[in-house]
Image: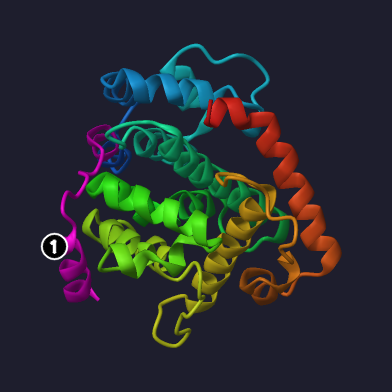
Amino acid sequence: MSTDFKTVVSSIRDLPPMPVVAVKVLELLNDPNVNYEKLGAVISSDAAVSARMLKVSNSAFYSMKRQIKTLEHAIAIVGERTLRSLVLAASLEGMNKSYGLLEKMLWEDSMGCAIGCRILARRFASADPEEAFLAGLFRHLGKIVMNYSDPDAYRSLVEAAYSDGVSTSELEGQYFPYAHAIVGAAVLDRWNFARSLVMSTMHHQDLVISLDEEENGEALMRLTATVNLAGHICTKLGIGQREPDDDLDLLQCPGAKELDLTEDEVQGALAEVEEVFKENRDFFVG
């Protein structure tokens, strides 16, 4: 796995670095003696990340009863595992060299899937909610990296896909040497993220996971199925898309089949994701 991923990473023209603040926060969270003051100081060193994190922590998505005004308060309230998710989300948003309509759509797609994954994980006990949030967040990291490394080629890809009425995945091979799923997995591997996040990113479309070869294969499959279904829900609702795909049959998507969901369960999840995303959109995407 490592050799192939190294080849993929070496093919990327301009690889984005792991966000500095995220690296420092992840290091601190591994220290049993870390305190909120240290964490707050590191996060506040990046004004954009700290502002985004405060904004998100005040969303209804995190069910806070009163307004959070300081980073230390936010850290104390949300807890370390959720803090990790928030900092990575805030850092990932700031990774773009520019921030136009295309970048906004990519970010909305990432956050929509992250929110959807957290909801599905809780609703169906299909995965750990915070791990699911990160898996959804990173699902299309490869697209963000493609756009970062060669924005002209990626924009041409998106325009061609729109003109032909197909998904960008179908045309990626004409513009880039590797598909976005492989690129995203390779970058996460380079950044030393957990194998579960690497593999769920790599297989979020096809769910081709060897249960015998992977440690905790069943759990990985359920996590990846959660990401797959959340991604299809975003497509159906038009989250991060030019327009909703009203004709998409969610019950037939690989994730719903793997989780063995009923029509009522899928429709209930769709309604909840739509409601929660609408309620929190301005906190996450605005």
Task: Determine the main secondary structure of the stretch shown in magenta.
Answer: helix
Looking at the image, residue 221 lies above or below residue 106: below
Residue 116 position, x and y percent, is 62, 49
Range of residues picked out in magenta: 1-24
Frontmost residue, 211 versus 201:
201
Task: List the single residue furthest toward the right.
Answer: 264
Task: List the single residue furthest toward the front.
Answer: 163
* Residue at image location 74% in from the left, 55% down from the top: 246
Residue 62 position, x and y percent, is 61, 32
Q: Is residue 39 magenta?
A: no
Q: Quarter of the image for the N terminus: give it.
A: bottom left
User: Which amino acid does the dot numbered 1 rest on?
Assistant: Ser
* Residue at image location 46% in from the left, 48% down from the top: 137
* Residue at image location 48% in from the left, 78% down from the top: 217
Looking at the image, residue 138 lies above or below residue 89: below
Frontmost residue, 241 versus 46:
241
Q: Secondary structure at mark 1?
A: helix
State the image quarter where residue 210 is shown. Answer: bottom left
Which residue does the numbered mark 1 point to in the structure image?
Answer: 10
Residue 53 position, x and y percent, is 45, 26
